[in-house]
Amino acid sequence: MKRFYKDAAVAAVNGGLGVALDGKPVRTPAKATLAVPSPALAEAVAGEWRDQGPEVVPGSMPLMRLACTAIDRVAGERAAVIEETAGYGRSDLLCYWAEHPVQLQRRQAETWRPLLDWSARALGASLAVTEGVVPVAQSESALIQLRAAVAEYDHWMLTALHAATTVTGSLVLGLALARGEIDAERAWAASRIDHDFQAEKWGEDVEAAEAAAGLRTELDAAVRFMEFVRG
């Protein structure tokens, strides 16, 4: 749609902070007033609106999209989102190591083993690993601990955790990001070990590279969202 406002600014709304376009509060797609939990997040979302050109491009406002998701979906469906996010623990990317070659196995071990050790130590969730793609069963105790870790978060952090987990394919990576154990760069590199190894060997596919760029943008937005919510 064409830009219909001149200015975007942080504004007090419903006892919290939101964004106003020419003095009118921004609403979510479900018509709820946009109210976010921190001044930093409110300012960042306002910045996305200010940065729009003659056309408003929703895809260029990932923080706005995450905030709307938190309000319109996750707040009212928190239990379902917890289950969906925790479900990634049953098939976490970090648990599926290559059968060969040894160079790829070495990269996975160097990057993934410390993260799995962190999961066991910090979350109480010791996950089993396997080689290849045949599913490996995780212990119920580990899955219970992972679900409990997910359930600790309010709908704001849960929204970002869900986004980071789906992008990387790893709940361990998502929780490590949420707890500040790793940054976006490390999480992205860990999630792309297999892909990057194949690209080095056979070359990068243009369409795959474009898709990866989109996923990286989503991950970066999720991590920024976490940081703003944490303050």
Image: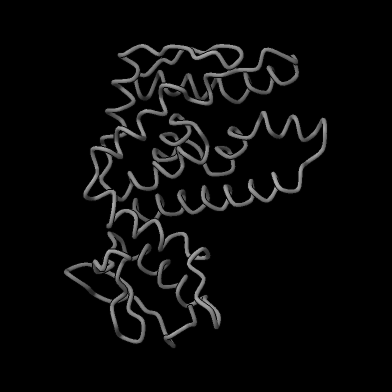
At x 63% / y 35%, what residue is drawn? 192
Instruction: Please state which of residues 190 and 69 is positioned toward the viewer in this rendering.
Output: 69
Q: Nearer the viewer, residue 196 or 207?
A: 207
Quadrant containing the C terminus in the rendered view: bottom left
**x and y percent of residue 206 in the render?**
76, 48
Check the image and report above or below for 95 versus 62: above
Image mark count:
0
The correct choice, above or below, for 12 with respect to 98 in the image is: below
Nearer to the camera, 98 or 187: 98
Is 183 located above or below residue 67 in the figure? Answer: above
Quadrant of residue 86 within the rendered picture: top left
Residue in the image at 40% along x and 40% along y: 178
Question: How far across and down, in percent of the image, does residue 191 sit?
Answer: 58, 34
- Residue drawn at (30%, 27%), measured in percent from left and top? 147
Q: Is residue 144 left or right of residue 49?
A: left
Q: Residue 196's spot in the image, x, y percent?
A: 71, 34
In the image, taking residue 139 as reference, residue 31 lies left or right, namely left
Outermost residue, left side: 15
User: In the rendered view, how is the structure colored?
Assistant: one colour
Question: What residue is rendered at 29% in x and 71% in y?
Answer: 27
